Each structure stands twice: as C-alpha cells, then as structure tokens.
Image (cartoon, rainbow, N blue to C red):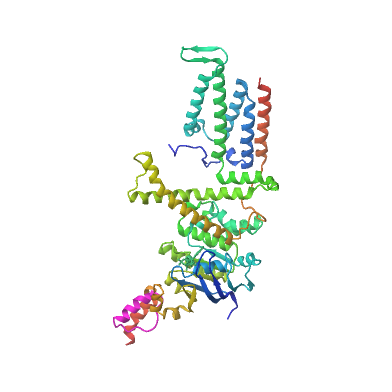
Amino acid sequence: MMEKMIFGRYIPADSIAHRLDPRAKLLFVFIFIGIIFLANNGWAYGAAAAFTVLSIWLSGVTIRFLIKGLKPVMIIIAITFVLQIFFAREGDIIVDLGFVTIYEEGVRQAIFISTRFLLLVFMTSLLTLTTTPISITDGLESLLNPLKKIKFPAHELALMMSIALRFIPTLMDETDKVMKAQMARGSDMSSGPLKDRLKAVVPLMIPLFVNAFKRAEDLAIAMEVRGYRGGEGRTKYRLLKWHGRDTLALLSLVGLTVLLVLLRG
Amino acid sequence: MKKPIISLDSITFRYPNSVHDVLKQVSFSIHEGEWVAIVGHNGSGKSTLAKLINGLYFPENGEIHIAGIKLDNSTVWDTRKHIGMVFQNPDNQFVGTTVQDDVAFGLENHGVPYEDMVKRVIGALKQVKMDDFLNQEPHHLSGGQKQRVAIASVLALRPDIIILDEATSMLDPHGREEIISLVRQLKEVQGLTVLSITHDLEEAAKADRIIVMNDGEVFQTGTPDEIFKLGDELVKLGLDLPFPIKMANTFKEQGVPLQGQYLTEEELVIELWTSHFKK
Ligand SMILES: Nc1ncnc2c1ncn2[C@@H]1O[C@H](COP(=O)(O)OP(=O)(O)OP(=O)(O)O)[C@@H](O)[C@H]1O
Ligand SMILES: [Mg+2]
C-alpha cells in the first residue's frame, strides 16, 4: 500500500507540466487553491473540474493513476461525502426513511465539497508528481527571497529542506539496518500488544538519534571547511529560468478566475 | 628544501570540556609538494590536529602558519581556501542532493559565477572519473564513489593542500587502493601537498615522510624507512607494522638472513628470490 501511495512523490517524465518552472507551478497551485472557493454552483464547479482535467492531461498522468495512488485520500473524501449528506438539514426532503432523512441541499453541498476537495488534492498532487523535491525547494527559496528584507530566513529554510531531502534515504537505510540488528537480537516490533511494540521501538530510536546528531556535527564541519558561511555572497548552481509557457500557465488561471466569477450565481 | 606550506609551532590545545591537553607542544612543518602521513593510536589527537590546521578550533598556545599566513580569527577564511579536507564517513560530507550539486556547494559558497562554476564542476568530476554520474543521488553511490565525489568537491576549489582524515578507512581494500592512487596521481599532476591521517601503515609506508603521534605529542618524524626501523617501539604505541615488515621480521627470527627494510611486498619478494644467488 505504501508503495502505491503517490501523495508527495515525484514521477520522472517529460511532459509540459514537468518542464514548467517550479515557481510557476507553486504560484499556480496556490492561486488555484484560492480561486476554487469562488465556485458556488454546478456550472462553476464543472468549469473548475474541466480545467483540472486539462491540467492532468498536460502533465501526462492518467486520472486512473491518480485515483488509485490517492486511495486513502479518496476514502476520506467518501466519508465526508456521506457525513455531509446525513447531517445537512436544509432544502426539500428527498428521502425519508424515518431514522434518516436526506435533504436536497445536503446532497448538493456534499457533491460540491467533495468535488472541491478532490480538485485540490489532484492539483497539489500534480505539483509534486511533476516537480522534483529539490526544484520545489529552489522555487520556494526564490519566491520567498523578497521576504529576506524583513529578515525572513529564506536561504536557511531552503538549505534545511534540501539537506533533509538528501538525508531521508540515508536515514531510512539506517533505520532498516538498526531494525534488523535489533531483530537479530530478539526484538519483536511487528507483533504482540501495542505497549510491547512501542517498548521495542525505543532501542530503535536511540541509536538513530545518536547517529543523526553525529551526522549533523560531521556535516556542519564538512560544510564549514568548504567555505559555507551563510547565504551572504553565495552564487547559485541551480538556476531557474522563466519561459513564455510559465507566463501562459498563470494567464490560464486568470482566464479561469474570470470564468468562475461569470458563472457563479 | 622548498618552503614550508604548513608550519605548527609548539601548539597546545584542549577541548572546552576536556580535562587534559589533547595536543601538547606539537611542532612540525610540511613542505610544498610533500606527502606526509600522520599515524598514531586512537585518540592520539590526529583529527584534532587537522581541525586546528583548518581553523575549526584555535590553539591555546603556539602559532600555525598556512602558506605564509598566520592563522587566526581574522585570516581563517583565507587560510581555509588553501586547504581541502576529505573526512572518514562518505555519507556525512555529502551536502548536495546530487553529485553535481555536491561539487557545486563549495563553489557557491565562494561566490563563483555560474558559467565558471559549471566548467569547474565538470572539470573536477572528470578528474576523479565521476563525470558519468552528474545527476546521481548519494544513496545510489558506493562508498568509494562518494569519496571520489568528496575529492572532486575539494579539487573544484583548487586548494594547494589536501588533508585526508582517514578518508579510506570505511572502504574495502580495493576502494582504498583506488582512492590513494587517485590522490597520488592528482598530487603529481597539480603539485598538491597531501597530509594523510591514517591507520593503514602500508599506506603510510608510501608517504615521503611520517609523523608518529602519541598521546597528543609528536613521538617521531622521519622517512618511512627511519620510522619502521623503530619496529617494536611502534607496536608499543598501539600501531601495527606493515605486512612486509612483519613478514621480514618473522623470516629473520627463523634465521633467514635478510638485510635492510622492505616497505612493499615487492621489495621483500625480490630480496627473497635473489638472496639465494648472493651467497
Ligand atoms: N569534540 C570534542 N570534545 C571533547 N573532546 C574531544 C572532542 N573530539 C575529540 N576529543 C578528545 O580528544 C582526544 C583526541 O581525539 P582525536 O579525535 O583528535 O583523536 P584521533 O587521533 O583522531 O583518534 P582516531 O584515530 O580514533 O580518529 C581524544 O581523547 C578525544 O576523546
Ligand atoms: Mg580521528
């Protein structure tokens, strides 16, 4: 199940969406999250859905792949859908079974809210599916750069994120190693009562933490030796390049905004 | 004799939280283009020495000069430009998310312009034969490959001195051999000065000079020949003799008449098969 989960994962490919500048994609998703709330009727939601389908198509991902990969999220959406139907108490009654009554407004709201949720999840997944984590970091740093004037640590934040990204696989490998070493010594983390299992995790966490601190210290020394002294005066190796297509992507959102405003009732 | 590029003058040092002096009255010089090995038991202060030379800590007493500059708080970033350092753990010195990012990290720090940076990254990776791995992530590389990248990161900064702090100790014998011959070749081509901290006395045997550390003091300095003549004294310091020397000693004990020192297996073998004719 973990392998199939695509939330937050990058899938290498060469689609238009993959080639967009990460800043454009970040802005695109943030703006989309903002304007989706403009939709308040079937037509507007239809337009937003069509826009999302088009975006998915341009990213070379299939909707089936998205739905399969986002199964846990789908379940949450289904649950909210059901709850919404049963708890809304407005509009005409369409079904009355005595113990439950379903109102028209409830169904309407349930459909709208789930659609909105679904579109948001699809769009944010598209961002991570088509952008490497390090590009997202670069994009964020670049977008947050103006905030340096008010002492916001944009460079430090980006560096922290990139180091975290770089060490995730290393720490995963290490967890695996320590876990096997503890299992070889008779520790059992996969069965028994919860309390015992939690207890078995402690001897796993301690060596991991100790090693992580050791790594952090070594890394800090290695960075200093290679001349790292903060973001001041640094040049950048990963350059971001804004193309016409990036502007076009953002313009398409302006189009969608206008459409949503016109369609909303 | 060429001029010294690193010189330490009666260095004394202790860590803020330690009771004893970790380094006591340490003095030595290293000349331009030399390959010097530092050996010594665990905790004898070798890594501390390297950290002081790099200005990561400052000595309590004594002076350090790097390329003629006196090392202190105000010059540390200048002296550091002369020195590249490769550490023991291949993972803990890999800063970038990919091979090329890692090599670029130091260049970014020094504010090297983009066009120049691209050339230097590729150039350095070519020198260590890792230019086919530009976009590879560290967890897909072997320890030896990561150490090559670490060397490339150092080379890209064009230092005069390379310090290896047990840079090969986490590698298998093959990887070890590869890294050492790579550094040796780079040293010849670029006239680098190499300071290699090592537990591997066979590696030390190939150095121009060996410094033996014991308990924070310089025990002895000399050519490999001179140092390995100490024999048992080294063993008492907790050091292991290189295999050919141990072998030769065993032969001598068994009454095989061997003269001189054999630092490499080859020398020993040649002596053994020719000794018969010399009688
Ligand atoms: N950060 C530190 N704080 C306090 N004491 C330290 C620190 N680092 C090292 N020491 C102590 O300083 C002494 C010398 O350590 P150092 O790491 O220089 O030895 P070494 O010769 O490199 O040993 P090894 O061969 O194990 O790498 C040791 O006694 C060690 O415990
Ligand atoms: Mg050490």
Give percent across and percent down for residue B57: 57, 66
Residue found farthest to the right: A149
Height in image: B113 above or below B214?
above
Quarter holding residue A91: top right
Q: Is residue A202 visible in this depiction of the protein?
A: yes
Q: Give me the residue at 34% from left, 76% from top.
A: B247
In front: A48, or B66?
B66
Q: Quadrant of the N terminus of chain B?
A: bottom right
Give percent across and percent down for residue A55: 59, 32
Question: Which stretch did the figure color magenta?
Answer: B244-265
Q: Quadrant of the C terminus of chain B?
A: bottom left
Query: Residue B256 magenta-drawn?
Result: yes
Q: Give me the residue at 40% from left, 43% from top.
A: A198
Height in image: A169 above or below A56?
below
Quarter holding residue A196: top left
Height in image: A63 above or below B201?
above
Give percent across and percent down for residue B233: 40, 78
In front: B197, or A201?
A201
State how many labels appear: 0
